[in-house]
Image: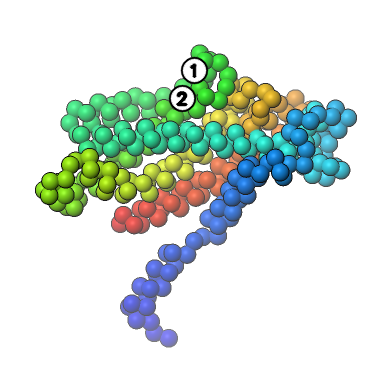
Amino acid sequence: MTLTIPALRARGAKQRRRRPLSLWIAVVTLSVIAGTAVLAPVLAPHSPEATSLLDSLAPPGTEGHWLGTDSVGRDLLSRLMYGARLSLLAPLAVVLLSGLLGTAIGLLAARAGGWVDAVLSRAMDIVFSFPSLLLAMLVVAVSGPGLLAPICALAVSYTPFIGRVVRSVALQEGARPYVESYRVMGFGEWWVTLRHLLPNVLPVLLAQGALSFGYALMDLASLSFLGLGVRPPEADWGSMISQERGAILQGEVWSGLLPGLAVLVTVVCVNLVGEHVGASVGRKQR
């Protein structure tokens, strides 16, 4: 059968619109993780803090404990569900704060230009040169353990990632003819920026935010593992791994492996979604 040129183009467009299986798996997995975090008080079979030394390090499938227990007899499934709350909310707060700061700085640098652009760009370069995890550790060392200080420190550290991308896209959009036409018609610079440039920046911002979420999750889990994150009795996945270090050294790796797998699966799924969004944005811009 011979296909016409329009038919070939339609088939190509349909193939481009087809979502890969890995993307659907990532979306479903993230939906399940987020759903269990929200519904943890309803779905968790036990209290996350209920201990039973007689049931410590019970293997998966033990009566009443589907995923087993940790070194002090706490139900691992319940702790994973409750731990997902802080493990997801804290990186989300980092992404939202850095997104707001980065968008404001990037748009201001792109639209103001001149010495304002030079100062803001150099400031972002300076912040970008500091490792995010090291900066968070320094802030926590001054303020003490807790989530607020690491969230603020990581938000500042991730701001250049967002700001540089937003600045680049805003400069490209600002050079387009429609922006000049609005300027000639008498519309204000910031009206054009907020009304027309910002909507065109949002898709790129979403893609960068998804990737930043994965990095923030790993950084916050690392801080919790080092004892610089959440404070007991609250728990996230990083602190769960830290609390099971003794069991891991004794060869009982299961209780520490599960929260580590939760971090790994979540980061991989978020990165898959972020890469797909970024690829989609790139195709639209071309």
Q: Which residue is mark 1?
A: 138
Please, which residue is most extreme toward the bottom here?
A: 1
Specify the quadrant of the image occupied by residue 198.
top left
Task: Determine the secondary structure under disc 1.
Answer: helix
The answer to whether one can see residue 252 in this image is no
Q: Amino acid at mark 2?
A: Ala
Lateral position of residue 113 relative to residue 138, left or right: left
Tally the numbered discs: 2
Please, which residue is most extreme toward the left here?
A: 184
Q: Residue at x 54, y 33 (%)?
A: 90
Q: Residue at x 34, y 81 (%)?
A: 4
Q: Which residue is mark 2?
A: 153
Q: Residue at x 33, y 28 (%)?
A: 124
- Verify CB contact (< 8 Å) between mark 1 and mark 2: yes
Residue 153 at what x, y percent from top left? 46, 24
Q: CA distance from mark 1 to mark 2?
A: 9 Å
